[in-house]
Image: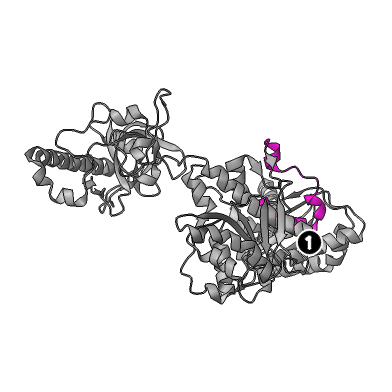
Amino acid sequence: MGPTGFRSLLLELHTLRFNILQSQYLETAFEVVHGHHAEPSTTQTTLHDHFSERIPSFGDFGDQQGYAGSVPGERYLTKMLNKAVERDEHDANQHTACLAPDQISIDDSHKVNKHLAKIDGMSLFSALWTLMDSRYIRAQVLTLTKAHDERAGPLHAVADSIKKYGFLEPPIAFSDDPTKDKSLLYDAFPSLSQNLTPTAAAHGLKPLELPSTLQIVTLGSIELAEQALAPLMAPLDLDPSSYLCLSIDAEWNMSRRIGVSILQLAPHSMPDFIYIVPVHRYQRLPTSLLRLLVSKQVFKIGSNVKGDLTRLQKQFVQLSDQPGFNVVELKEYCIQRGIITRKESGTLDKLLEKATQMYLLKNAQLRRNDGWEDCHISSELLRYAALDVFASRTIFEAAAAMLLAKHITHETPHGTQVSILVQEGGAIAAYGRISAFQPKSLAGIQVATQGKMRLVIDVDAVISPSAAAILHLIPPPTSGAAISSGKTKAGTYTYGQLRASTSSSCGTFQVVVPISLLEFDHRNPEPSTNVVPDSDLSSLLPISQVQVSHEPVGIPECLDDDEFDNIESLGPEVVDLEAEVTELQMLEAQAIVEQAQT
């Protein structure tokens, strides 16, 4: 209970005490009056005769001459409680230090800092970090940022105290973000990282291991780098149409602010070799390495490879004028293959699990050290570096063996069955078909955009009526008009509202949907259909699905902006149809607005 609650409790108790005394006083007065009234009297008296100047008023709670009720303020109570806590602080710390921690838990509180350490009403600190065991708070600190450095000091102090008193390290730790906090906890309590079963292993995945035939070669000098890397460029020089896939990764000391310490290279044409290049020793990059990095015939492959090359570019002046590099980002590559969605994590270990059903078994603490620039890099660090770049090559090779994921485009034939997603990579909101007629706009919503990223869909089944049709905005209400209770937080109509507003007897209605929210409908796959081996997206659809799409006479499958401007040249039938569609759109828009207002 804080000072505010404690003051409220004191006020309640004092008020109760005042009410009890006042009740007792009035009862006594009543008895006195009742006794006088029962005595025989020869003269007529009134009740006022018994009260006049005999029984004074009890007074109110705050009467200075009476009860004089008063409760200390919050500031006084705060100082009093703080003084009491500070007086016992040493004993309390000693008591908790003498207790073995059965567990620990850490968390940030963002409420306390709103009431403490303010300057001109602004909070200085972002959070109050707390470490406690199952019963007692062992450490607290006000933090400015989310950086681990501000929390490492108190955490290590608790760890040192536990060792000093001869206790075992806590067997388990709790956190609301274990992925982020585990490095901090492992550094203070190394036993927490021992004898753990990775989550991926618990799901039956196998660890990725370096092949026994793999050789890890450290190129410690420019001469060695030239001897090893020059043969990689020789075939490219002889044949300008040839190319080389090169998995690349980088590591650097935690104290290094610019550049990298080493580069790991895994040529796909030489699967039994991984080269470790300690570039921190070089004033200038070896010629062969420089050519590999800038050549457009060499595909540099890796996870966040752009970030590694950007750090390298700031380190060596030879790369300062390089406008860009020919890179393959593994996350984007896996998205194109349908291995992950864009909103999923694209870290190296996650990509490896998704693409190969293996997991990356490595000690994350090895990466966060200053041993990458030692004269002789330890075997543990070399294996760590080689495993990273080997994982990159393994992921790429596994993803390359998969077909490109089928995506809806502006050229996908009309009539194709599609699923409409709530959000990119999310659940399905509705099913429908690509409309045969794609106008410039529908119900005031632009369809023909510059990037051709929208399509009109004939929706025939709504799965989530409360899902928002994100392009169908609700018009702002006029003054005095009530806002529809079905309005979404985004201010758009829902698919349920659009379905209710349709006048079609079959229940089909049209919506404008971003292409990024469209997927092929796989509810009823036809096992007998084949796939046409062609690069055109429409040929990636089943043959039967492509062939059953028929265009109405006189209407092109998709109209570009120039074709819309010259639509009259298509004949009077198309002009009449466009007029009818426009009139229908206006009626639908008017019906939707009237429904929203009612």
Q: Tell me residue 37's x, y (percent).
A: 65, 48
* 297 left or right, relative to 388: left
Front in this rendered view, residue 361 or 455: 361
Does 460 sit above or below residue 332? Answer: above
Answer with the quarter of the image where residue 484 lies: top left
Q: Residue furthest right?
A: 166
Majority secondary structure of the magenta segment? helix
Q: Tell me residue 241's x, y (percent).
A: 45, 55
- Residue 29 visible, this angle: no
**Which quadrant, please, contains the N terminus?**
bottom right
- Residue 279 visible, this angle: yes
Assess whether residue 248 is covered by the magenta stretch: no
> Magenta stretch?
176-205
Q: Residue furthest front?
A: 238
Residue at 28%, 55% (x, y): give it.
Answer: 450
Judging by the rendered image, the residue that carries numbered circle 1 is 378
Q: Residue furthest top?
A: 528
Q: Tell me residue 453's x, y (percent).
A: 33, 49
- Local packing at callout 1 (Cα closer than 10 Å; few below 14, some 14-19, many 20+) is few
Front in this rendered view, residue 369 or 472: 369
Answer with the quarter of the image where residue 9 lies: bottom right
Residue at 82%, 48% (x, y): give it.
Answer: 171
Q: Tell me residue 179's x, y (percent).
A: 66, 52
Front in this rendered view, residue 112 or 587: 587
Amino acid identity at mark 1: Ser
Does 359 sit above or below residue 414? Answer: below
Count of numbered marks: 1
* 442 left or right, relative to 221: left
Front in this rendered view, residue 512 or 122: 512
